[in-house]
Image (cartoon, coloured by chain):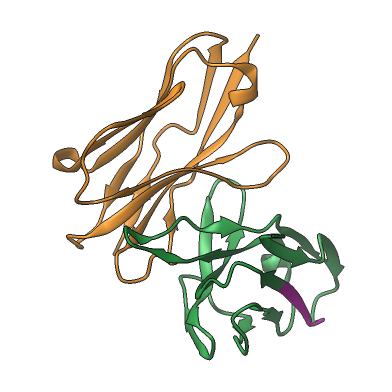
Amino acid sequence: NAGVTQTPKFQVLKTGQSMTLQCAQDMNHEYMSWYRQDPGMGLRLIHYSVGAGITDQGEVPNGYNVSRSTTEDFPLRLLSAAPSQTSVYFCASSGWTSGGFDEQFFGPGTRLTVL
Amino acid sequence: AQKVTQAQTEISVVEKEDVTLDCVYETRDTTYYLFWYKQPPSGELVFLIRRNSFDEQNEISGRYSWNFQKSTSSFNFTITASQVVDSAVYFCALSEAEYGNKLVFGAGTILRVKS
């Protein structure tokens, strides 16, 4: 199993450009999430999904869109990049066990810089 | 609203010392999950433990131990006989029972273990 994969690993954008951060998992997990990590602030939830076709906003959704057309993929779209979106982005997935929600498995992250 | 507080921004210890990382949480839910993750300098997020709110048993895994106390809303993490390889950022996180993929993270504690 590859686990959770994210592409690209690094990206530099100019203000106003758009792009899509890719996230895929091969563990057949229903639950997926996107977080951003900024210095001194821990990770904050951007959007999450509880299954294909079902998404919802997290704590900091402005400027981002998501879709979930398949169980495996959960791309994050930046509509018009701003310097405030400079951050490290993590995608995560999790499943369900008899004990409840399982741990979230995190991808390696995408380091995005917006100039 | 849920909140996680890690009051210790940075801790420095000498190898073989014991160290405790504090985590205090706030939630109105009666059922929830608590997590600890480690982020080494390489940047990936490593799962350490998940705890259900109805399971207050303390847990020990090698040099790691966790003390969960609902009465004080705390979920503290102790490393016994610390090693240089323990140097990392440690995050405590909380999720509601219904959506275990909506993690609320603390700001993290930077642990530096010196030889």
Chain B shade in the render: orange
Residue at the left extreme, as displayed:
B71
Q: Main secondary structure of the magenta part?
A: strand
Q: How many marks?
A: 0
From the viewer's perspective, is residue B36 above or below residue A13? Answer: above
Q: Position of residue A22 (x, y in %)?
A: 74, 74
Which residue shows up at 65% across the image and 8% down it? B115
Magenta span of residues: A17-22
From the viewer's perspective, is residue A80 above or below residue A53? Answer: above
Q: Position of residue B99 (x, y in %)?
A: 37, 70
B100 or B39, nearer to the observer: B100
Q: Is residue B105 left or right of residue B84?
A: left
From the viewer's perspective, is residue B7 above or below residue A104? Answer: above
A65 or A28, nearer to the observer: A28
Q: Quadrant of the N terminus of chain B?
A: bottom left
Q: Is residue A30 left or right of residue A106?
A: left
Judging from the image, what is the letter of the chain drawn in green?
A
Q: Residue B95 is drawn in which quadrant?
A: bottom left
Q: Is residue B19 left or right of residue B71?
A: right
Q: Position of residue A74 (x, y in %)?
A: 64, 78
Which residue shows up at 23% across the image and 36% down it? B57
B28 or B82, nearer to the observer: B82
